[in-house]
Amino acid sequence: MKKIGIVACILLIACSIIATGQTAAPPYSGPDKPEITDGPQGGYLPGNKVLVNHEYTYTAMTTDPDGDQFYFKWDWDDGTESDWLGPYDEYGTGTHAWEEAGTYYIKVKAIDDPNGDGDLSDGQESAWSETYKVWVRKPLFHVVEGVTIFEVQSTVLPQEVIQAQIEQLESQQYESQESQQQQST
Ligand SMILES: [Ca+2]
Ligand SMILES: [Ca+2]
């Protein structure tokens, strides 16, 4: 009787382990915390500069543990957020133009759409991504004779190069005025 008792006890434990294992199936979950992977962060070099009132596109990525498609919402750190944009499988983008110069720390979060119907009320949100620093500035313009405008890359180009460009533009301007005067006389 004692042996039977032990066997029964072991069976009971085994059964409860199996039962527990079944209820511990992978739980439904929202997308992983996204990461911002690409987009200009500001500077003087072409391809990286971010000027006020120009649109720039940023890329983020994440995955959903259940394989659901998901949507991104961007926080542009100027008091505005995007709508939920998507659906995406891995990478998604957001586009924004800042109205004021300054340093912004943008971030993005994701929500999945388990039944894939575009209604996100059944979705679960991820955490916000780490922030991504964007330096937005006003363009630096030089106006020569009120006509020629170009951006001076003052932290990239030596001052003498800038001065040479200005002088060249001024001489072109002078020559064109000379030729116009000759034509009119
Ligand atoms: Ca999911
Ligand atoms: Ca849905």
Image (spheres, rainbow, N blue to C red):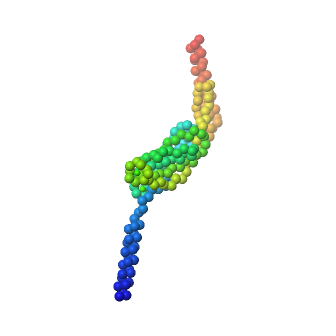
- Picture quadrant where residue 139 is located: top right
Image-based side of 123 in relation to 54, left or right = left
For the C terminus, give its image quadrant.
Answer: top right
Q: Is residue 117 above or below residue 179?
A: below
Could you say where residue 40 lies in the image, as x and y percent from the top left?
A: 53, 44
Q: Residue furthest front?
A: 121
- Picture quadrant where residue 149 is located: top right
Q: Residue at x 38, y 84 (%)?
A: 6
Q: Is residue 59 above or below residue 160?
A: below
Could you say where residue 108 lies in the image, as x and y percent from the top left?
A: 51, 50
Q: Residue at x 57, y 38 (%)?
A: 99
Number of numbered callouts drawn:
0
Q: Residue furthest bottom?
A: 1
Q: Residue at x 57, y 44 (%)?
A: 78
Q: Residue at x 41, y 63 (%)?
A: 26
Q: Is residue 3 above or below residue 117?
A: below
Q: Give whichever of 74, 50 is nearer the camera.
A: 74
Q: Is residue 78 visible?
A: yes
Image-based side of 26 in relation to 172, left or right = left
Q: Give whichever of 158, 40 is nearer the camera.
A: 40
Could you say where residue 5 lies in the image, as x and y percent from the top left?
A: 37, 84
For the N terminus, give its image quadrant.
Answer: bottom left
Could you say where residue 69 lies in the image, as x and y percent from the top left?
A: 41, 51
Q: Is residue 112 visible?
A: no
- Picture quadrant where residue 145 is located: top right
